Amino acid sequence: MAHILIAEDDRHTLDGLSELLTDEGHFVTGVSNGQQAVDLVQQQKFDVLLTDMKMPRINGMELIKKVHAVSPETHIIMMTAFATVETAVKAMRDGAYSYLTKPVDFGELLATLGGALNETALPARSGGGQTISAPEPVIIGNSPKIREIFDRIDRVARANATVLIRGESGTGKELVARAIHSRSLRADKTMVDVSCASIPENLLESELFGTEKGAYTGALSTTRKGYFERADGGTIFLDEIGEISPSVQVKLLRVLQERRFERLGGTRPLTVDVRVIAATNRDLEEAVRTGRYRQDLFYRLNVIPIVVSPLRERREDIPALIDYFIGKYCHENGMDIKRMTDEALALCRDHDWPGNVRELENAIESAVVISEGDLIRAEDLINLPSTGIAFEVPEDDALLTLADTKGLAEKALLQKTLEEVGGNRTKAARLLGVTVRTIHYKLKRYGLQ
């Protein structure tokens, strides 16, 4: 979710790009000439400037220089119908991040935009010999559930209230936390990420609150700051907050109530100014009922709740996510932008994605790498398990759907062909007129050995 400025004198192109990028969840401002763009950049911060090459008053090359001088942190992407090597080199030398040839391919634009945003980092502060920075988040989707999250982010970002983000694993809770921080009044300060489940229980307290010199046998000979001190003035993101022990729960409650704590082994209270954003995939209400989680801590964490829905409840976001990940991994692997066949897209839409967006991203990355040519086919989705079509012959009184019939026939033909060639998959592929990769995919899909 970025703030994007588009400078484009062709109204049709400007409106089209604005609509597409808004649908991807970005904040978009459009202007029709370079001077208007310069004026806006002098007044407010933009993450990305998308500019045409030829425009009235100030052309794209001049605009790159002016914007880079005023706002060097703004990534500039040039669009031109007259691309040459000389043009590209000059644009990059003058401060452009990249350039695109018109008419702009939207998948390529998303990939380039994603690369720019992944390089963007909020100003980092050094704490305890360690520099911690937060990249600009990119949240993809246009479903009602995602738009609710965008609206909630806008409403709560500039407040200091504690936020509890809930949702299944892989739904993007960390992205929501980063979006809140990047839109907050603390955006120029540090955001420190802490995965509570990945730190051993006996070390979590010292990691969060720090350690006084000689606090315990084997402790460092110097005082060490914890994550809360390193995040002073900024934001601390406590992921998997449902995993913390009762002793840490007590100390965390005090920080939330009083903004004070002591380092492990220390006696002097320390005060910090930190906004807390927490996340969990656990049912904390049930943990409170069973006595595993403090009720008062739960209330302190749950001041502003945000629920990130699983991907199966917002399937309309799947095509946009697929486009984004295809663009991202084609760009990372130096490939031309690929597209997905209708059969593969239907397979993705029908899958329940228990691992949510993270699982989808892994599947698309794999498919981009192994697919041949410019198409991603169903058989290229090798990490995608069966979508649940039942291939057992139904009871006599049951009805066969078209998909059932096709699946049964395909499975039977595959079995018969493999038996005839003694299990040789290369020969089976040649006889059936498909690739060996397709044979592997079908065997996995139908559970055949």
Image (cartoon, rainbow, N blue to C red):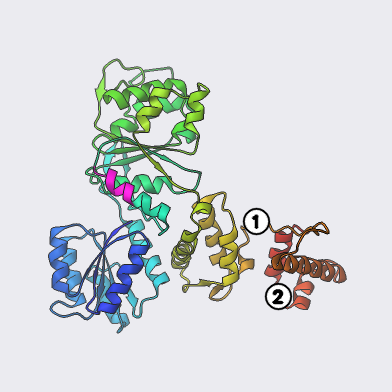
Question: Counting other residues with Cα less than 10 Å from the Cα at mark 1, is it few (<14), some (14-19), or many (20 or more)?
Answer: some
- Whether residue 419 is visible here, answered yes or no, is yes
Q: Nearer the viewer, residue 332 or 241?
A: 241
Q: Residue furthest top?
A: 267
- Residue at 26% in and 19% down: 269
Question: Counting other residues with Cα less than 10 Å from the Cα at mark 2, is it few (<14), some (14-19), or many (20 or more)?
Answer: few
- For the record, the magenta segment spans 151-158
Q: Which mark is residue 385?
A: 1
Q: Secondary structure at mark 2?
A: loop
Locate residue 302 relative to residue 182 in the image: left or right. right
Q: Which mark is residue 434?
A: 2
Image depth: mark 1 or mark 2 in front: 1
Instruction: Assign the N terminus to one quadrant of the image.
Output: bottom left
Q: Amino acid at mark 2?
A: Val
Q: Residue furthest bottom?
A: 82
Q: Nearer the viewer, residue 120 or 245?
A: 245
Q: Amino acid at mark 1?
A: Pro
- Residue at 70% in and 75% down: 434
- Whichever of labels 1 and 2 marks the residue nearer the N terminus, that label is 1
Could you give the CA–CA distance between mark 1 and mark 2, rounded to whole angstroms? 20 Å
Q: What secondary structure characterizes most of the magenta part?
A: helix
Instruction: Assign the C terminus to one quadrant of the image.
Output: bottom right
| Residue 372: quarter of image | bottom right
| Residue 49: quarter of image | bottom left
Q: Secondary structure at mark 1?
A: loop
Locate residue 432 relative to residue 144 in the image: left or right. right
